[in-house]
């Protein structure tokens, strides 16, 4: 294993209040095992992470809805407590974007990658991402941005139902609203209803062409781009199991070399001048074979520990080495290595993996977080089942989440544990409502090829109804350049 500078501590920041965020525990263990003093700024109430023997100290996080100034004040207090410059590792989108905005203000107490301008915010914003992809020639599902309920209904028909509905800035979704960052919409009425909650969500609604899941279609790529511009500490992985079905967060993933995807990723990060840790999600189009970028997360993904190589390098260690001006070793890939999240895939955790395996929660050298997780989970599941039953009795269910299970840009626990129990061992290519691919069949039988990247103009709004429009849809120039 490479030698990290143990004189330089690390501070992990997570604003999201998810007690079951296994990525934070992965970062604690990765750095702690290398002899680094690890401080965690996160909600510790009921979190298994606080039980890790590698945590030096837990610090209270900024309150929900904190301003950038409030977050900076918390980080300055932690820096004073740590008393020497530390490597700062944001663990969720809200943290990454806040740190990106105040990088210079934190320079006295923290070591950070030199990220260009507002790049982290541009790639994390799902509306901006379509334009970013178009500018560098990376495939991205066609994305429409409605400006009224009628436009939302018309856009759903233009794309071809079902469609993906996303909030542009999911980290702004308030807790307790029941809103999710991504859902499948199966009717124009659902699209209208979601649009009407835009103010509540805190960011615009996007409607996106649905790329059906299937075997060998859901991929992710993790890496760290250092000061030299080279990528280290990661690789390509394929989802074998996910929660929820249809490619949510990775419940079982496998390190699967993919030169085509690696070339695409390096072209993207190189063109943007990106620096730091990243986590990208892709879906391969079953007809064209092209990889479409679905999400660009400017921070470690929850399953980043999948890519610890034969030399002990992962993206978090690569960050620490680079920012302390230590050499980054040549990669020693371990293709076939697996990563399993036990509470989402308990059956997967029981199966041996020929290429080696890491569990998200259990570790022989740090057993307390795993025991704490199961204790909390056995209480959490019945409570969520009761809440789910109450919602079903009180009204119709919300649209099923199928592309990611995130709110606030960070992998969250299930909102409907009945679905989680049903999907515990369901492959990524499991049953979902099929979407039209690669042709969108319009009303009255007009077939139009599905576009492959970027945003496209919205149709002119039809009469205020969720019924299909009567004829071809006109262009609306307002939505073409978002």
Image (tube, rainbow, N blue to C red):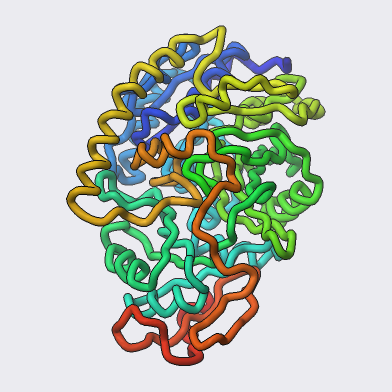
In the image, farthest residue toward the left: 394
Give the vertical position of 387 relative to 3 (above or below): below
Residue 284: tell me if it is visible.
Answer: yes
Residue 102: tell me if it is visible.
Answer: no
Please name whichever residue, 228 or 150, is drawn nearer the observer in this view of the structure: 150
Give the side of residue 192 with respect to residue 286, left or right: left
Give the side of residue 128 with respect to residue 421, left or right: right
Give the vertical position of 83 relative to 69 (above or below): above
**Residue at the image point whose x is 35% and y is 26% from the top:** 77
Give the vertical position of 88 relative to 374 (above or below): below
**Residue at the image point whose x is 52% and y is 16% from the top:** 362
x%, y% of residue 64?
28, 40
x%, y% of residue 428?
58, 44
Give the vertical position of 140 relative to 375 (above or below): below
x%, y% of residue 342?
50, 25
Placement of the N terminus among the 4 image quadrants: top right
**Residue at the image point whose x is 52% and y is 57% from the top:** 122
Please identify the quarter of the rendering in which residue 283 is found.
Answer: bottom right
């Amino acid at each position: 294993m490479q030698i990290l500078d143990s004189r330089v501590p690390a501070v992990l920041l997570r604003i999201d209040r998810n007690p079951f965020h296994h990525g934070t525990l992965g970062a604690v263990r990765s750095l702690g095992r290398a002899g680094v003093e690890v401080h965690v700024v996160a909600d510790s109430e009921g979190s298994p992470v606080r039980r890790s023997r590698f945590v030096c100290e837990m610090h209270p996080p900024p309150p929900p809805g904190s301003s950038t100034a409030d977050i900076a004040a918390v980080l300055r207090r932690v820096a004073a407590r740590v008393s020497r410059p530390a490597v700062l590792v944001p663990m969720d989108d809200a943290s990454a974007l806040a740190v990106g905005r105040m990088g210079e203000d934190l320079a006295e107490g923290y070591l950070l990658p030199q990220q260009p301008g507002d790049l982290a915010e541009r790639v994390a914003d799902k509306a901006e991402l379509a334009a970013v992809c178009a500018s560098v020639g990376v495939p991205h599902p066609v994305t429409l941005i409605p400006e009224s309920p009628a436009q939302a209904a018309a856009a759903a028909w233009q794309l071809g139902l079902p469609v993906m509905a996303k909030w542009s800035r999911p980290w702004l979704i308030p807790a307790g609203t029941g809103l999710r960052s991504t859902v499948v919409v199966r009717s124009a009425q659902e699209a209208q209803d979601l649009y009407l909650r835009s103010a509540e969500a805190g960011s615009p609604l996007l409607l996106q062409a649905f790329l059906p899941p299937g075997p060998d279609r859901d991929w992710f790529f993790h890496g760290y781009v250092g000061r030299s511009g080279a990528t280290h500490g990661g690789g390509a992985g394929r989802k074998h199991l996910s929660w929820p079905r249809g490619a949510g967060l990775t419940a079982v993933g496998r390190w699967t070399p993919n030169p085509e995807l690696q070339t695409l990723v390096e072209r993207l990060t190189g063109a943007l001048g990106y620096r730091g840790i990243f986590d990208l999600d892709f879906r391969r189009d079953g007809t064209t074979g092209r990889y479409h970028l679905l999400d660009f997360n400017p921070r470690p993904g929850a399953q980043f520990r999948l890519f610890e190589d034969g030399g002990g390098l992962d993206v978090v260690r690569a960050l620490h080495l680079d920012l302390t001006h230590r050499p980054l070793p040549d990669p020693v890939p371990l293709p076939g290595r697996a990563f399993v999240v036990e509470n989402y895939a308990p059956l997967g955790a029981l199966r041996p993996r020929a290429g080696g395996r890491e569990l998200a929660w259990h570790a022989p050298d740090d057993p307390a977080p795993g025991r704490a997780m199961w204790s909390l989970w056995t209480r959490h599941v019945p409570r969520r089942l009761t809440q789910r039953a109450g919602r079903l009795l009180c009204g119709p269910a919300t649209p099923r989440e199928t592309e990611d299970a995130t709110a606030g840009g960070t992998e969250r626990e299930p909102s409907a544990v009945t679905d989680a129990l049903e999907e515990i061992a369901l492959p990524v290519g499991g049953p979902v409502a099929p979407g039209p691919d690669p042709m969108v069949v319009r009303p009255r039988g007009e077939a139009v090829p599905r576009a492959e990247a970027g945003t496209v103009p919205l149709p002119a709004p039809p009469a205020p109804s969720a019924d299909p429009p009567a004829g071809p849809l006109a262009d609306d120039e307002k939505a073409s350049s978002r």
